Structures are given as C-alpha cells and as structure tokens.
Image (cartoon, helix red, strand yellow):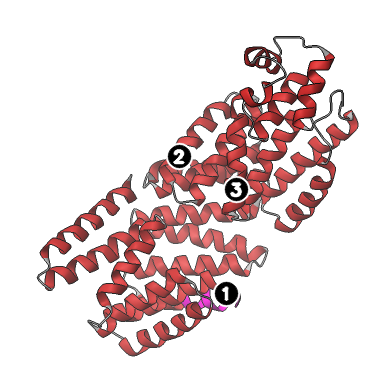
C-alpha cells in the first residue's frame, strides 16, 4: 500500500524516480518499493513521504472510503443521465469529502470522473489538464477504471471532432466491457456514444444497429429522454441514406417523447431536423413550416439552435429564389450572431449573403478566413464547401495555381468526412 501511495503521488507531482531517490536511496530500490517488491525501513519510507508531502502511516477511514465510493458512483450515474444540476451539487460535496484522502485507487477514480465532468460541461482546458495527469496513472488502472479511461477518452476525442480517434478508444473500451459485469444503463449509454461516432465516420449501418440496441435498453430503463435522442439519431441516419419516410417516422417518434415531458428545446431540435428532411425532398413549404416551429420552441438564450435554424430558413428561401425573404433572414441572423460573437455562423450568414449579392470586394478574404477557421475546428464539410467556392473564384479569375490548391483542399476535406 505504501509503495503504491509513493508511486501515485510521485507521478501526480511530476517527479521522476531519479529526482525522488536523490540522496535517499538508489533508483532501482525505489522502483522495487513502488511495485511492492521490497520492504523498506520505516526511516526510509518516512524520508520519501516527507519529500512528497504525504503521511507515512495514514490509513483512510473505511467508512469514509465506502461513502466516497458510493458518492462517486452516484455522481457518475447523474452525469450519464445528464442531470446537470444534481451533478454540480454532488461535485461540490465530493470535493469536500476527498480532502485528506490518500488512497491511490480512490484518487484515481475521482480523477477519472472529474475528467468526465469537464467533458460533460465542455470545459476543454480543464479536461486537458486532467488528461495529462491520467497519462501518469494509466498503467496501474484496474480493469473497471481502464474501461472508463478509454471510454472517457473516446468522449473527449469526439467532443474535439476527432472521430476516428474516438472510435479507436471506444473499440478498446468495448473489449474490456465485454468481460465486465455491467448494467443495462451503462450498456445503453455506451452503445449510444458508439452509434454517434459511427454516424460521424459515415458507417451508417453500424450506427443504426447500435442505435437500435441502445433504444431497446433505454426504454427498458424508462430513460425516455435518451430514447428520444436515439430516435433522433436514427432519423438523421436514415436521412443521410435518403430513406426519408423512415427518417420522418423516427423524428415523429422522438417528438412523441419530447411532448410527453414537454421539453421545448428537444422539440425545437426535432422540428429543425424534420424541416431538413423535407428540404432534401424539395418540399420547401413543409420545410419552412417545420423550421418556424423550431424557432417557436427555441428559447432566446439558445443562440446556437436559433442561429442554425435561421440559417436554414434563409438558405431555403435562397433555394426557391425568394431573395427578399432570404435577405431578411440573413440580416436577422447576422444581427443575432454578431451581437453574441458567434463566429461560426457569422461566416455562414456572410457567405450566404455573398452568394445572394454576387461578387463582393471582400469575397476572397472572407472565403480564405472561413476555410482557415473551419479547418482549425475540423469542420470538414464546411472546409469542402467553402474551399470549393474559393477554388471556383480563383479559377474564374484565371488564378489557376490557387484554384488547384483549393480544389485539392476541398477534395481532401471530403475524404476526411468519409474516413
């Protein structure tokens, strides 16, 4: 136990074996102590612990440890259910309880769940800091904690739009999951996240199979909010493969769930997606009706949702050559996103207006800035679209070398969407 404690705190403090052993013992002997292969004297251990700032003989209170384990398990359950308020309350309680605890396994579990917490709340910088610490303890994780490590790392990569890397981590996690005793709630959530990443890398059949499995499990667990999310994913998958009738069926199923617990934001997302389905079928009247329903259910503070829907409304009017209404919605959308400094949709609205008004003096600069922005964000579909627009601009201007560069860039972006 004391060897594991020394190793854990040495790694967390970023101290090498050479630095800790200096003036106290040899490096090979310290390594044996850390791995439980040597029985050091009390005096030697005292020197090592003093150097690390940990106690020599402290044994954490068993009741306290059991209580912490239960609280951490509850914390994770609430994170899985996305009960944000309860998650925040539990975090504060656990932070107070963990003070003074020196049990390495407990501290590692806490570190992993803190990583999950920062992913849930999209706190990228804090998640990065925790990830650096987790690298140090990765090799000593139990099977259960190793599963969480790979699973949470997959969530982390997914959130950073590194979908191939996310899938690789989920594959590692799945191998561990198959040999573990787990509950339906954990299986359902894991399959859902796997289905999401297969959607992102255009493996739609795999995504649909996993989504169908987790939908059944969510319903058995009476987790109807996540069942609604899964119906939405199945709707999106079917829209991608042009199975519009099946897509509408799944979105309508999701809508029934959303209406049953009167979730306005979820209803807004579903109406948005239904509008998209009918837009793909060139039924602009229905598409616009659903987009308007999406806006009606938007809360004013949901800037991202409102921006997306306003952009699709403007695009739909542009598609049917109703340029006055297209310009109206572009101006309305730009007013919203500029006020909130929402750069992604500032580019989208400005470039749609560029299509509407024809060549502008800043066309080249705006397109280049947009391509750079979306490339940095790994938004390959937008890199492809705007890269091609820029390539066409250069080609029509007789700048064939620049045109060739951006045609290649757009083509490479399309390959990344598929891979």
Callout 3: SS: helix
Residue 237 in the image: x percent, y percent?
A: 41, 52
Label 2: how many Cα within 10 Å (few below 14, some 14–19, many 20+) = many
Residue 238 in the image: x percent, y percent?
A: 40, 54
Q: Who is closer to the viewer here, 50 or 258?
A: 50
Callout 1: SS: loop
Q: Which residue is mark 1?
A: 298
Query: Which numbered disc, 3 or 1, marks the residue closer to the eye?
Result: 3
Q: CA distance from mark 2 to mark 3?
A: 19 Å
Name which residue lies at 64% across and 53% down.
224
User: In the figure, residue 376 lies in which quadrant?
Assistant: bottom left
User: In the figure, residue 345 lies in which quadrant?
Assistant: bottom left
Name which residue lies at 28% across and 48% down.
415
Stretch of the chain drawn in magenta? 291-302
The residue at the far top in this view is 38
Q: Could you tell which of marks 2 and 3 lies nearer the N-terminus?
A: 3
Q: Could you tell which of marks 3 and 1 lies nearer the N-terminus?
A: 3
Q: CA distance from mark 3 to mark 1?
A: 29 Å
The residue at the far bottom in this view is 324
What quarter of the picture does the N terminus occupy?
top right
Residue 166 in the image: x percent, y percent?
A: 47, 42
Q: Is residue 256 above or below residue 196?
A: below
Callout 2: SS: helix
Q: Which residue is mark 3?
A: 127
Name which residue lies at 34% across and 56% down.
380
On residue 167, which mark appears?
A: 2
């Amino acid at each position: 136990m004391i060897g594991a404690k020394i190793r854990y705190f040495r790694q967390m403090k970023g101290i090498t074996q050479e630095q800790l052993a200096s003036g106290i013992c040899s490096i090979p002997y310290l390594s044996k102590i850390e791995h439980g292969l040597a029985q050091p004297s009390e005096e030697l251990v005292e020197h090592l612990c003093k150097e690390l700032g940990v106690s020599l003989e402290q044994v954490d209170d068993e009741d306290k440890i059991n209580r912490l384990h239960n609280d951490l398990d509850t914390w994770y359950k609430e994170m899985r259910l996305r009960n944000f308020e309860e998650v925040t309350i539990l975090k504060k309680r656990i932070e107070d309880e963990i003070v003074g605890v020196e049990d390495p396994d407990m501290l590692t579990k806490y570190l992993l769940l803190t990583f999950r917490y920062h992913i849930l709340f999209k706190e990228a910088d804090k998640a990065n800091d925790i990830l650096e610490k987790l690298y140090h303890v990765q090799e000593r994780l139990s099977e259960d904690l190793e599963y969480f490590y790979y699973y949470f790392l997959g969530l982390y990569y997914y959130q950073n739009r590194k979908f191939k890397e996310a899938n690789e981590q989920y594959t590692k996690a799945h191998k561990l999951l198959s040999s573990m005793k787990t509950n339906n709630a954990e299986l359902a959530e894991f399959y859902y996240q796997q289905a999401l990443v297969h959607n992102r890398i255009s493996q739609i059949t795999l995504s649909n199979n996993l989504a169908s499995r987790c939908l059944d499990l969510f319903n058995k667990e009476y987790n109807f909010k996540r069942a609604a999310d899964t119906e939405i994913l199945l709707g999106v998958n079917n829209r991608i493969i042009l199975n519009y009738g099946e897509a509408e069926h799944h979105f309508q199923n999701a809508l029934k769930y959303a209406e049953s617990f009167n979730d306005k934001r979820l209803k807004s997302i579903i109406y948005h997606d239904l509008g998209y389905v009918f837009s793909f079928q060139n039924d602009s009247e229905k598409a616009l009706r659903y987009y308007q329903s999406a806006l009606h259910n938007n809360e004013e503070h949901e800037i991202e949702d409102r921006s997306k829907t306003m952009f699709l409304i403007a695009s739909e009017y542009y598609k049917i050559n109703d340029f006055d209404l297209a310009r109206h919605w572009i101006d309305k959308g730009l007013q919203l996103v500029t006020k909130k400094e929402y750069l992604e949709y500032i580019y989208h609205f400005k470039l749609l207006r560029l299509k509407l008004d024809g060549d502008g003096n800043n066309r080249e600069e705006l397109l280049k800035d947009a391509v750079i922005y979306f490339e940095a964000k790994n938004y390959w579909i937008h890199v492809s679209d705007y890269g091609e627009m820029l390539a066409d601009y250069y080609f029509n201007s007789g700048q064939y070398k620049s045109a060739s560069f951006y045609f290649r860039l757009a083509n490479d972006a399309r390959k990344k969407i598929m891979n």
